[in-house]
């Protein structure tokens, strides 16, 4: 409820808190109306595909969020994986404000990398994409490179 009415909060960092999908759902509901939050940091929070899907839906309507940090949301901690990254990419198809996406160590494989590649071909707002310690392999790297070939905004 607080996030719905707060008009001064710029950054929300909830790293290493086991808020899980239920907590992320509550945060996303609050942020649907929020116009001031620019950074959402939810690393190592017990997030799964369900939570990532909520974030994807939030990205479709958010006009203020510029940075989304989801690192260490994989296997032993959380499992976002390809399906979660696909949901986030779907949200970013509509989003014009997010400049930084950190999906470091989120269980992403070549399937998620292919989706990111397609996103990079059409997204004009992302400037930073961090995706280290994922298992995308050579095929995933080539796929992302294909997307980078068309992208004119990504710098990191």
Image (spheres, helix red, strand yellow):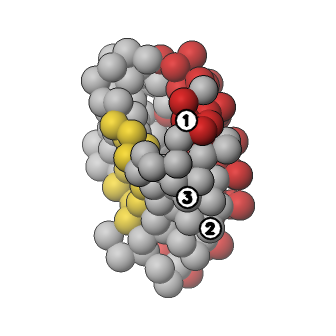
Residue 89 spot, x, y in % from top left: 61, 52
Which of the image's four quarters has the N terminus?
top right
* Residue located 33% across and 20% down the image: 17
Give the residue pinned by disc 1.
Answer: 3
What label sits on residue 64 in the rendered view? Answer: 3
Question: Horizontally, is 124 left or right of 44 in the view?
Answer: right
Of 132 and 64, the residue lying toward us: 64
| Viewer-nearest of discs 1 and 3 | 1
Circle 2 packing at 10 Å, graded few (<14), some (14-19), many (20+), is some
Distance from label 1 to label 3 (Cα)? 13 Å
* Residue located 34% across and 55% down the image: 130
What label sits on residue 96 in the rendered view? Answer: 2
Residue 66 spot, x, y in % from top left: 47, 59
Which of the image's four quarters has the C terminus?
bottom left
Which SS class for mark 3?
loop
Residue 82 spot, x, y in % from top left: 55, 38
Question: Horizontally, is 125 left or right of 17 in the view?
Answer: right
* Residue located 59% across and 53% down the image: 35
- Taking 6 as reference, is 74 above or below it? above
Total numbered labels placed on residues in the image? 3
For the question of whether residue 59 can be seen, the reply is: yes
Distance from label 3 to label 2 (Cα)? 9 Å
Of 39 and 137, the residue lying toward us: 39
Distance from label 1 to label 2 (Cα)? 21 Å
| Viewer-nearest of discs 1 and 2 | 1
């Amino acid at each position: 409820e607080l996030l719905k009415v707060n008009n001064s909060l710029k950054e929300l960092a909830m790293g290493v808190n086991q808020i899980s999908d239920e907590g992320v759902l509550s945060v996303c509901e609050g942020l649907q109306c929020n116009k001031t939050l620019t950074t959402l940091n939810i690393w190592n929070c017990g997030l799964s595909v369900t939570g990532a899907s909520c974030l994807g839906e939030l990205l479709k309507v958010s006009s203020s969020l510029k940075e989304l940090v989801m690192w260490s949301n994989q296997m032993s901690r959380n499992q976002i994986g390809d399906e979660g990254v696909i949901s986030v990419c779907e949200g970013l198809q509509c989003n014009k404000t997010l400049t930084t996406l950190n999906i470091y160590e989120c269980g992403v494989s070549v399937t998620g990398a292919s989706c990111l590649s397609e996103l990079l071909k059409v997204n004009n707002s992302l400037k930073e994409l961090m995706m280290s310690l994922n298992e995308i392999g050579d095929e995933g790297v080539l796929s992302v490179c294909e997307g980078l070939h068309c992208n004119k905004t990504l710098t990191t």
